[in-house]
């Protein structure tokens, strides 16, 4: 069965510092991987997705993620945090390119401090 | 204005009452999904529908029911059999993203309904 683990339910960074949110996956077949962002009391918005085309994936708002098969990881990074990045971030995995039946991680709450 | 509408934003019900959450879309997407979100647990799939008049149970379907009579609508009923219904409920559709190359489907989420059972 497929699953994702997000290390750290809460991450705090200073404004301008590197953002690193961790995601490890478990899958018996090549996965499709996604990162979503959720602002308070809103739905989820897709940041980026890995669909085997390239291991380094660039998304919206300056975020990117690198697929590392040897480490079964898909960590999300941003070089310089902004106050507007404060939100909850979810990693998700699917087998199909259609995003069918996504399995979500438990989420990481990102706090950005002045 | 294209998108997914969930109404109402906040819903309060007494214990033992059935309640129906609305999800409407004008994206012309065939597939629709219902998720439940609880603090610290991420999103869990309740039901999904790949096409009109067809739907399947997700991981936590007990105590819930759905219908898919129209492409645009996928209402979720939370029944009195659901033991802990207080949660944030998210509806999603699946369709082409058009944002990246190559184009693959992605899930688009509505704004959610927060249900509180008193």
Image: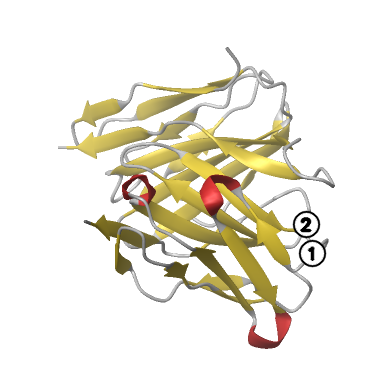
| Chain of residue at mark 2 | A
Find residue A20 and report its horizontal and vertical position in percent.
Answer: 45, 70
Find residue A18 and report its horizontal and vertical position in percent.
Answer: 42, 67
Q: Is residue B55 visible?
A: no
Q: Which residue lies at the image location 74% right of the left edge and 69% below the top edge?
A: A55
- Please determine whether, in this image, residue B21 is positioned above or below residue B57: above
Labelled disc at residue A54:
1
* Residues indicated by labels 1 and 2 sit on the same polypeptide chain: yes
Query: Could you say which quadrant of the image residue B52 lies in?
Result: top right
Front position in the image: A63 or B85: A63
Labelled disc at residue B92:
none
Q: Residue furthest left?
A: B118
Front position in the image: A46 or B16: A46
Find residue B99 and report its horizontal and vertical position in percent.
Answer: 72, 38
Callout 1: helix, strand or loop?
A: loop
Which image quadrant: the C terminus of chain A? Answer: bottom left
Query: What residue is shown with label 2?
Result: A96
Q: Is residue B24 left or right of residue B78?
A: right
- Please determine whether, in this image, residue B31 is positioned above or below residue A65: above
Q: Which residue lies at the image location 42% right of the left edge and 76% below the top edge?
A: A7
Q: CA distance from mark 1 to mark 2?
A: 16 Å
Q: Nearer the viewer, mark 1 or mark 2?
A: 1
Mark 1, Cα crowd under 10 Å, few <14 / some 14-19 / many 20+, is few
Q: Looking at the image, tell me whether mark 1 or mark 2 is earlier in sequence order.
A: 1
Q: Is residue B88 left or right of residue B111?
A: left
Mark 2, Cα crowd under 10 Å, few <14 / some 14-19 / many 20+, is some
Q: Which residue lies at the image location 30% right of the left edge and 51% below the top edge?
A: B83
| Chain of residue at mark 1 | A
Q: Are marks 1 and 2 in contact (CB under 8 Å)?
A: no
- Please determine whether, in this image, residue B95 is positioned above or below residue A50: above
Q: Which residue lies at the image location 69% right of the left edge and 21% below the top edge?
A: B71
């Amino acid at each position: 069965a497929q699953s994702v683990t997000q290390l750290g339910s809460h991450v705090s960074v200073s404004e301008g510092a590197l953002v690193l949110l961790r995601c490890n996956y478990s899958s018996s077949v090549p996965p499709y991987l996604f990162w979503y962002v959720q602002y308070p009391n809103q739905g989820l918005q897709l940041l980026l997705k890995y669909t085997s085309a390239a291991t380094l994936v660039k998304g919206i708002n300056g975020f990117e993620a690198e697929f590392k098969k040897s480490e079964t990881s898909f960590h999300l990074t941003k070089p310089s945090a902004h106050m507007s990045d404060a939100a909850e971030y979810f990693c998700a995995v699917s087998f199909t390119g259609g995003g069918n039946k996504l399995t979500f991680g438990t989420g990481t709450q990102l706090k950005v401090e002045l | 204005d294209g998108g997914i509408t969930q109404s109402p934003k906040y819903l309060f019900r007494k214990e033992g009452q059935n309640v129906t959450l609305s999800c409407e879309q004008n994206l012309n997407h065939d597939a629709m999904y219902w998720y439940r979100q609880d603090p610290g647990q991420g999103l869990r799939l309740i039901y999904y529908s790949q096409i009109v008049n067809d739907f399947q149970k997700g991981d936590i379907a007990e105590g819930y029911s759905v219908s898919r009579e129209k492409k645009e609508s996928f209402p979720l009923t939370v029944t009195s059999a659901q033991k802990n219904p207080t949660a944030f409920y998210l509806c999603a559709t699946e369709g082409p993203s058009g944002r990246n190359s190559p184009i693959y489907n992605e899930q688009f989420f509505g704004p959610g309904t927060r249900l509180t059972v008193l």
